[in-house]
Image: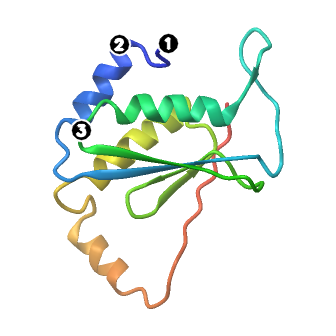
Amino acid sequence: MSLLGERERDAVASVWEHLAHDVGVRLDVGPVATPVALLAAGGREIDTNAEARALVEELCALSDRVTLELFEHQEAGAYPSLTVGAGLRYVGLPWGYELASVVQAVAVAGADGPALSEPSLERLGAIERPVSIDVFVTPT
């Protein structure tokens, strides 16, 4: 059973058809350190690891330039965890608006050049220490 409709699959494929470089996607699954019961419409509980795996496998199959590596862990952690390219990391199930963010992350990682303007690249080049940026989203 497909998680994405034909329209969604076509939209993703059209965004990814212009990838200039191969993009690696890593999916880590395992026991969740802080379990949260997610319920779908109708009251069924969602296995976020299985749902993320099915979704990411379906997405990655839409382009020959996007490859998936799956890692299954035994120890509890922040799972599912999705890493795109060299370091964009998404923790959780990427549904809704977050799915669009993952699709765009792959597009940017596979682009032929930087997505930032020259002044932005210069300002980033002036940073003298490692920086980590965390962005948090909540389902609405």
Which residue is located at x 77 percent, y 47 percent?
A: 32
Q: Nearer the viewer, mark 2 or mark 3?
A: 3
Q: Quadrant of the C terminus?
A: top right
Measured in 3D between alpha carbons, the distance from the residue under mark 1 to the one under mark 2, in whole angstroms, is 12 Å
Question: x and y percent of residue 47 in the render?
Answer: 71, 29
Judging depth in this view, the residue of 40 and 125 nearest the camera is 40
**Secondary structure type for disc 1:** loop
Question: Where on the picture, by quarter, is residue 115?
Answer: bottom left
First in residue order: circle 1 vs circle 3? 1
Question: What residue is shown with label 2?
Answer: 6
**Secondary structure type for disc 3:** loop
Mark 2 neighbour density, 10 Å: few (under 14) some (14–19) many (20 or more)? few
Specify the amino acid type for callout 2: Glu
Measured in 3D between alpha carbons, the distance from the residue under mark 2 to the one under mark 3, in whole angstroms, is 18 Å
The reply to whether the C-beta atoms of the residues labelled 1 and 3 are less than 8 Å apart is no
Q: Residue furthest bottom?
A: 128
First in residue order: circle 1 vs circle 2? 1
50 over 76 or under it: above or below: above
Specify the amino acid type for callout 1: Met
Question: x and y percent of residue 74 in the render?
Answer: 73, 52
Which residue is located at x 56 percent, y 31 percent?
A: 95
Question: What residue is shown with label 1?
Answer: 1
Query: What is the total number of numbered labels drawn onto the structure image?
Result: 3
Question: What residue is shown with label 3?
Answer: 64
Specify the amino acid type for callout 3: Asp
**Secondary structure type for disc 2:** helix
Mark 1 neighbour density, 10 Å: few (under 14) some (14–19) many (20 or more)? few
- The color scheme shown is rainbow
First in residue order: circle 2 vs circle 3? 2
Measured in 3D between alpha carbons, the distance from the residue under mark 1 to the one under mark 3, in whole angstroms, is 21 Å
Q: Residue furthest top?
A: 42
Q: Is residue 9 left or right of residue 55?
A: left
